Amino acid sequence: MSKPKRLHPIASVIQTGKRLRGLILPGIAFVFSVGRHGKEGLAGSLIISLIVVLITFITGILSWLRYTYRFESNELRIEYGIFIRKKRYIPFERIQSIDLTEGILQRLFRLVKLQIETAGSGGAEEAEAVLAAISKEEAKLIQDHVAAAKNDGAEESQFNQESQIVYKISFNQLVILSLTSGGVGVVLSAVLALLSQLNDLIPFKRLFGGLEKWAVHNLFFIAILVFIGFFVAWLISLVMTMLKYANFTVMKTEKDFIISQGLLEKRQITIPLKRIQGIYISETIIRQILGYGTVYIESSGGASANLEGANVTLLPVAKVKHIRAIIEPHLPEYVFVNSFIPAPRRAMWRYILRTWYFVVPIVITSIIFLKVWGLLSFILLALVTIWAVLKYKDAGWVLDQEQLSLRYRLIKRTTIHLKKNKIQSLETRESHFQRKRNLGTIEANVKSGVGAGGGAVIDLEKSDIEKIFAWYSRYKKRDCTEV
């Protein structure tokens, strides 16, 4: 039995900072809305805002004082709550993984954030337990206690176990990953979301209402500004990606993959091998042209607030032809096939027609209302047709003993490798038009920490779908429309 311990005092600063960040936009909106009623309204809103900030600081300190943890009877016992006292007891043998994060504040004080995942924490909003700021020595002590409970008293943490390097990102790979990432869309989305939140606070119409006439005569200048905006967003996403994946390393122990990454914020994720449900290889069009892909592991663990625990990046970027050599020695039960049984040729027009349903009306409407300029919409028709043909060419499947591999494309080309004993359900579907052409859809689902993972391939040969279903089912003769 150990005495109750508190987190490092910096934990109260971290928690208070999170709460204050959530109050920034509502606080600004409140000050502006009340401040419109004159100086008295503005002064009152500022006083109320200061009181709210003061209460936030006080509750942050009280939360830290009331949060304690200790070891007792092979359990981690946590008690917290200011007014209502809550207790959480976590048996060590239930702990599936321990993830460590070093944010900027933690690194300044040589601390870590420790996050515990258990068998029952998947799908919850938070992890089973989060210790926001403890020393590295204390984190190692917790790991040793957990390892001892799982190894019948043999105190051996994951760092003391014999480990080997599976993958370490090189500088060239980091550059390729950053240059080909889609982070620019994330940056632009964040900017647009912020502007939408400030729409009621900033009088955009009054400030920019007179710019319409100027804009009509300065389209070239506006185009340059738009290009500069996209370029700046791309640079920001480039830097963010490099900081996130710098020093990305994958280590393998006897029972776990240990993944560490990050420059400013260091993160360490532990993935138990027994919880791996499938392996995904994702290729964007640009990376596919360059011969690169990203490898993900679907795990049965992870909370919805910690998606990395369910779908975690194993190889952020690697040559597709080298993936097999990197992973197979460490996961020999998985077979990385290169050739797939494709969808039949008669299915190609179905892929094309499905995209035309949405685009052809746009083309017709553009020609009717825009006349000659509307002919440019044929470019859109050509692009979606090429995309549909790519989807058809990438569709495929293959069986290899106890493994099902599927390949399909939405925007990215995705290849999934699933072991038979990990597949939770196998579903086949036939629409009226598919039935007329002896085609169907196959979908395989595996258990994931945030629901179901897996993938589906559309318009495969019906006889191929029956083969897959017979392979999965204990009964060789069943209606192929059953789940």
Image (tube, rainbow, N blue to C red):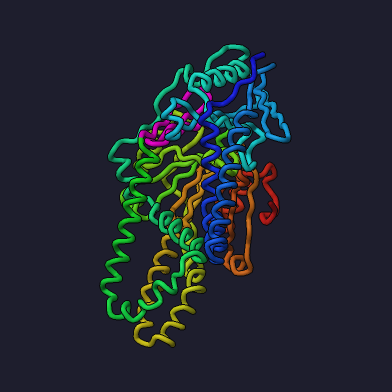
| Residue at the limit of the structure toward the right, as seen here | 84
Number of residue marks: 0
Q: Can residue 76 be found in the magenta stretch?
A: no
Of 230 and 192, the residue lying toward us: 192
Asked if one can make out residue 117 in the rendered structure from this viewpoint, the answer is no
Q: What quarter of the picture does the N terminus occupy?
A: top right
Could you tell me which residue is drawn at 56 percent across and 26 percent down? Answer: 7
Give above or below for 214 relative to 142. Answer: below
Q: Position of residue 360 (x, y in %)?
A: 47, 77
Q: Report the residue at 59% width, 66% height from top.
A: 434
Q: Examine the image and state in which quarter residue 151 appears.
A: top right
User: Residue 481 at x, y = what percent?
Assistant: 68, 56
Residue 46 against residue 402 in the figure, above or below: below
Q: Can you see residue 91?
A: yes
Q: Quadrant of residue 37?
A: bottom right
Q: Depth check: give the residue in front, 371 or 87.
A: 87
Give, as a single range, the part of the protein colored magenta.
247-271
In the rendered structure, the answer to whether residue 385 lies left or right of residue 418 reads left
Q: Quadrant of residue 124?
A: top right
Nearer the observer, 455 or 477: 455
Query: Is 256 one of the magenta-colored residues?
Result: yes
From the image, give the main secondary structure of the stretch colored magenta: strand
- Judging depth in this view, the residue of 118 and 398 nearest the camera is 118
Q: Where is residue 153? Give x, y as percent.
A: 61, 12
Q: Is residue 252 left or right of residue 73?
A: left
User: Is residue 342 shown above or below 306?
Assistant: below
